[in-house]
Amino acid sequence: MRRGYTLIEIIITIAITGILAVGMFKAFEAITLRSEKAKILSSLSIDSQSALDQLSLLLYARAPMSVKGCDITGTCVSLETATSAKILQWYGTASESYQLKDYSGFVDMTASNNPTHTLYSPDTNLSAMIATEKLKWNDSLFDLSKIVLIFSGSFDNGEDDYNYSIDASSTGTNIKLSNPRTPMRIYEKYNLVDSAYSVTRKADITALGCTNVLASIDDNALLLFYNYRPWKGQNFCTDGNVSILATNVNAFVAHQVNGTIRLGLDMNQTVGKTGSTVRLSKQKIVF
């Protein structure tokens, strides 16, 4: 009876074991990679959906016809005609105040004193609205000078460049315009606008050197700028606040077609040290 193994048998056994070990390692590595990719894809999907949902909510409360596409020089045109826009900008209505019924959004044309450009807005309390705005923006100095009025126009088509400043003497149900124009474009329905909003990738505005954007923020971050007022000479890059909507954003696009705004996000993230990249694209339409 043989009591041991020959050298050849031992070498063959070791070789087979090594081959199996390499195969198992490769299989485990592939499973781990697929699992990591699945986790990243899930994370990107949640982040992109969250960002698009937040944007759609803000855009839903936009002033009519106020959505613009802007380039890094600050030139803004209607989003329908914008071709090289890096920045999406719009005016937001004072929706929180509206929900609290601080202002009605309508003008009684018969009761209004047109010669002095004082508009009677029933069921409106400007003092209560300002109190709400102070809480909304955490700004104890917020006053009527930070708000503009934009009429909705026919079929809710308004013009943001034809806005009206509100005189500080306005009170209660009487809205006095401090910059009346001839001819006056006055309609029964109006919007009170309390802030402009802008969305862009940091990488697309790096050359601007925005003072309100931290240098530590990644270039692929999608940024939301708010609480600034172009009608007071302010701009998104130096005034107001900024927050991060999403990271790992490779591209952000916005188009306006037949009155609907179509938002698109392209995101990617590298998987560990493998150099492999997970990509995700998502779109959303805002009416």
Image: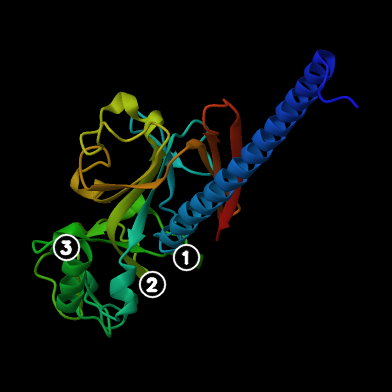
Mark 3 or 2 closer to N-term?
3
Front residue (pair 151, 93): 93
Horizontally, residue 223 falls left or right of residue 127, namely right
Q: Residue at x 49, y 44 (%)?
A: 79
Gap in angstroms between the C-alphas marked 3 and 2? 28 Å
The quadrant in which residue 175 appears is bottom left
Gap in angstroms between the C-alphas marked 1 and 3? 31 Å
- Secondary element at tag 3: loop
- Secondary element at tag 2: loop
Residue type beneath disc 1: Asp
Q: Read off the residue under disc 1.
A: 156
Q: Residue at x 59, y 45 (%)?
A: 41
Question: Residue pushed farthest right?
Answer: 1
The quadrant in which residue 264 appears is top right
Q: Which residue is drawn at 67% across and 37% down?
A: 28
Q: Kindly indicate whether the residue at mark 1 contacts the one at mark 2 (C-beta within 8 angstroms).
A: yes
Horizontally, residue 8 falls left or right of residue 26, namely right
Horizontal and vertical percent for residue 45? Answer: 56, 50
Q: Decide: is 240 above or below 276.
A: below
Q: How crowded is mark 1: few (under 14 residues within 10 Å), some or many (20 or more)?
A: some
Mark 1 or 3 closer to N-term?
3
Horizontally, residue 87 falls left or right of residue 104, namely right
Disc marking residue 57: none
Q: Which residue is drawn at 25% across and 46% down?
A: 230
Q: Read off the residue under disc 2.
A: 189
Horizontal and vertical percent for residue 38? Answer: 62, 46
Mark 2 or 1 closer to N-term?
1
Residue 153 in view in this figure: yes
Q: Read off the residue under disc 3.
A: 138
